[in-house]
Amino acid sequence: MATKTQEVEQKGGQSRHRSLGLSDEQALRIYEVMRLARAIDERMWLINRQGRAPFVISCQGQEGAQVGVAAALKPGYDWVAPYYRDAGVVLWFGMTARDQMLSFFARREDPNSGGRQMPGHFGSRRLHIITTGSPVGAQLPHAAGIALAFKQRKEDGVAAVFFGEGSSSQGDAHEAMNFAGIHKLGVIFVCENNGYAISVPQSQQVAVQNLADRAAGYGFPGMVVDGNDVLACYEVAKQAVERARRGDGPMLIEAKTYRLTAHSSDDDDRRYRQAEEVALWRQKDPIQRYAKYLRESGSLTDAAEQEITERISQQVDEATEYAEEAPDPTPDDLARFVYKQEPRF
Ligand SMILES: Cc1ncc(C[n+]2csc(CCOP(=O)(O)OP(=O)(O)O)c2C)c(N)n1
Ligand SMILES: [Mg+2]
């Protein structure tokens, strides 16, 4: 039996992205950002394994859900509340490979926190990326608050918040969805369901099969989408964004996906996942899958692919060299970002 995505792929045929309102150029841009996110992450693992940086937490496998949803938003106008895997989201919103590497090496120039936070704690007021905290799920009420501000200002901006299925069992998730449902706030709740919260499988986090079912309890729609199909993610996010801008309230999108790496560089996933399971999901890699579609639709030529590859490796090389050489924070930086007016010690 064909899955929903396969049916859509067949039905939409060669120009699925065009039928979603995406030009060839936009479709390729989505591809390039997905690849850039992956390439930065792969470089980080190499550096970490060489002992040059202490910690990696990866986006790998989830780039389709991240970039697909982000592409339906307006960077610089809408706001995002990402979680630590969301390199694809923040790159779409304007962060650069250099920014990511500065954060990875914990340098003073790191735009997220000046090298004070762990990697993956994204944040940029300029880029409308709300700063990420370490307790999982805390970003959901933040997003509801942003959407409330948009509503009070009578603006049609949208707040999109991203989180894992494990984080969805935090009280914060319930409070944010309940509040957003009651006040019909323009929030898009994006659950990147990768089946595990570190070593804990989904079955030990939620008693339902689809996280999206929870939305009914808060009075708004929930949609399940194939998170490894970037265009399907874009399509559902576009609907959610339109709905939110109209003032019709939130939507919960559950993007079913998988993380291709261990939880982090400090985790050994062989202790709780079968190699066969990982191998199966590798075959569903969202980047490979989208590349195949783009090639078949005639939007991605060999020459274009090569140009993208060169651009990406140049950016990743430059970012790595720059960040590795960049200065560390100093003791004088201790109170940066903590107080509006920095105290003198
Ligand atoms: C409140 C809280 N509890 C526990 C942790 C430790 N922790 C960090 S990431 C994580 C797993 C979260 O899983 P999920 O939300 O599914 O996201 P994933 O890592 O799978 O993408 C946990 C338990 C934390 N950071 N905050
Ligand atoms: Mg998870």
Image (cartoon, grey):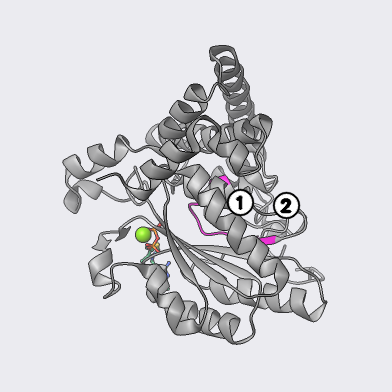
Q: Which residue is mark 1?
A: 70
The residue shown at (25%, 62%) is 201
- Residue 200 among those drawn in magenta: no
| 45 relative to 178, above or below | above
| 131 relative to 263, above or below | below
The residue shown at (58%, 24%) is 299
Rendering quadrant holding ligand 2: bottom left
In front: 5, or 169? Answer: 5
- Residue 82 among those drawn in magenta: yes
Left-right relation of 269 to 298: left
The residue shown at (45%, 64%) is 223
Q: Ligand 1 within 8 A of label 2's CB? A: no
Secondary structure at badge 2 equals loop
In front: 168, or 343? Answer: 168
- Numbered range of the magenta stretch: 79-88
Crowding near the residue tagged with mark 1, few <14, some 14–19, many ≥20 C-alpha atoms within 10 Å: many
Q: Position of residue 279 (x, y in %)?
A: 24, 37
- Amino acid at the residue labelled 1: Ala
Q: Looking at the image, can residue 324 be seen?
A: no
- Amino acid at the residue labelled 2: Pro
CB under 8 Å between discs 1 and 2: yes
Left-right relation of 10 to 206: right
Left-right relation of 311 to 295: right
Image quadrant holding the C terminus, namely: bottom right
Which label's residue is closer to the chain start, 1 or 2?
Answer: 1
Left-right relation of 244 to 45: right
Secondary structure at badge 1 equals helix
Q: Looking at the rendered structure, which numbered label has been put on residue 75?
A: 2
Q: CA distance from mark 1 to mark 2?
A: 8 Å
